[in-house]
């Protein structure tokens, strides 16, 4: 399994955030797509970085705070694996939500070639302390997919 080519498990459907998105728009984008981060492109479509919920958290910690209405009867009854939906997100107010993604994103882009093995990619993610890695094709500047820690875990639990 360690030698499984990453091209066999990568997600070829890249969801891209735009630098010009606000943090509020980003939060909606990530939640609606049920992802925790995404590559970021500029207005010309060039990759400029990556952004994640951790970046949103760091930004809101610097500029304000996050307030969630906890008055609903089921707020504390959620199981750890339940996800929040768009309706839940509407109850979330991110102070400073108008800040642009370009101001909070991570400019370092970690990637691996599509002929890398699952072990190579997992090692690169551990060493870089990242939860997603862009996968490139013959041109190392053009992503052809993405792999997340969840993708790697899914391989381990497959029958």
Image: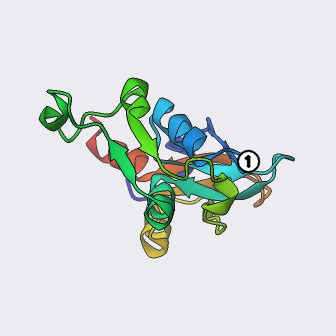
Above or below: residue 141 compared with residue 11: below
- According to the image, label 1 marks what residue? 20
Residue 89: give x, y in percent of width and height: 41, 33
Residue 4: give x, y in percent of width and height: 46, 52
Query: Which quadrant: the C terminus?
Result: top left
| Displayed quadrant of residue 84 | top left
Residue 45: give x, y in percent of width and height: 81, 46
| Visible residue check, residue 115 | no
SS class, disc 1: loop
- Viewer-proximal residue among 117 and 95: 95
| Displayed quadrant of residue 131 | bottom left
- Count of marks placed on residues: 1
- The single residue placed furthest to the right in the displayed view is 44
Residue 121 as seen in the image, left or right of residue 155: right
- The single residue placed furthest to the top in the displayed view is 87
- Viewer-proximal residue among 96 and 37: 96
Residue 31 as seen in the image, left or right of residue 19: left
| Displayed quadrant of residue 141 | bottom right
Residue found 16% across the figure and 28% down from its top: 74
Question: Dot 1, crowdedness within 10 Å: few (<14), some or many (≥20)?
Answer: some
- Viewer-proximal residue among 5 and 79: 79
Residue 87: give x, y in percent of width and height: 39, 24
Above or below: residue 154 compared with residue 149: above
The colour mode here is rainbow
């Amino acid at each position: 399994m360690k030698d499984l080519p990453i091209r066999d498990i990568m997600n070829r459907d890249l969801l891209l955030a735009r630098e010009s998105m606000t943090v509020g728009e980003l939060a909606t984008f990530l939640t609606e797509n049920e992802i925790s981060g995404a590559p970021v492109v500029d207005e010309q479509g060039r990759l400029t970085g990556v952004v994640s919920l951790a970046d949103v958290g760091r930004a809101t910690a610097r500029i304000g705070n996050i307030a969630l209405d906890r008055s609903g009867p089921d707020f504390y009854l959620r199981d750890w694996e339940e996800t929040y939906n768009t309706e839940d997100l509407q109850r979330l107010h991110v102070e400073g939500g108008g800040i642009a993604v370009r101001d909070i994103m991570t400019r370092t882009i970690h990637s691996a070639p599509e002929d890398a093995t699952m072990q190579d990619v997992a090692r690169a993610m551990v060493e870089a302390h990242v939860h997603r890695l862009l996968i490139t094709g013959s041109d190392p500047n053009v992503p052809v997919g993405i792999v997340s820690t969840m993708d790697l875990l899914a391989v381990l639990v497959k029958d």
